[in-house]
Amino acid sequence: MAERACPRCKYVTFEKVCPLCGTETSSNWTGLIVVIDPDESDLANELNINSPGRYALKVRK
């Protein structure tokens, strides 16, 4: 089963619906960032990431 990404929050998951925001996910995504501590990460702050996890850099529907 291929990983999917949410077009709204860019969270990467195996689910068809994003567990963070409830949006339908897409299998068409590129790039990956892993955020461990979003409170201490400047990049997570710039990308508006508030939860630890894996995130896509670009998602197409």
Image (cartoon, grey):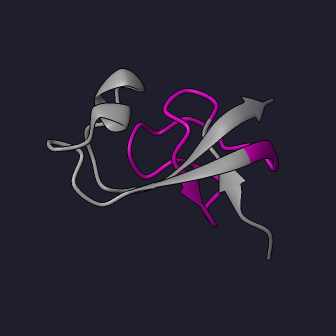
Q: In the rendered view, does 39 fall on the left or right side of 28?
A: left
Let me know if residue 21 is in the magenta part.
yes
Residue 27, horizontal then vertical, whole percent: 81, 50
Location of residue 2 with respect to 12 vertically, above or below: below
Q: Main secondary structure of the magenta part?
A: loop
* Residue found 21% across the figure and 54% down from its top: 37
The region drawn magenta spans 7-30
- Using the rendered view, name the quadrant where residue 38 is placed: top left
Q: In the rendered view, does 32 fall on the left or right side of 30?
A: left
Let me know if residue 58 is in the magenta part.
no
Location of residue 8 with respect to 49 vertically, above or below: above
Task: Please name whichever residue, 40 or 27, is drawn nearer the observer in this view of the structure.
Answer: 40
Task: Please name whichever residue, 28 or 44, is drawn nearer the observer in this view of the structure.
Answer: 44
Residue farthest right in this picture? 28
Quarter of the image with the N terminus is: bottom right
Residue 41, horizontal then vertical, whole percent: 26, 42
Quarter of the image with the C terminus is: top right
Residue 6, horizontal then vertical, whole percent: 60, 40
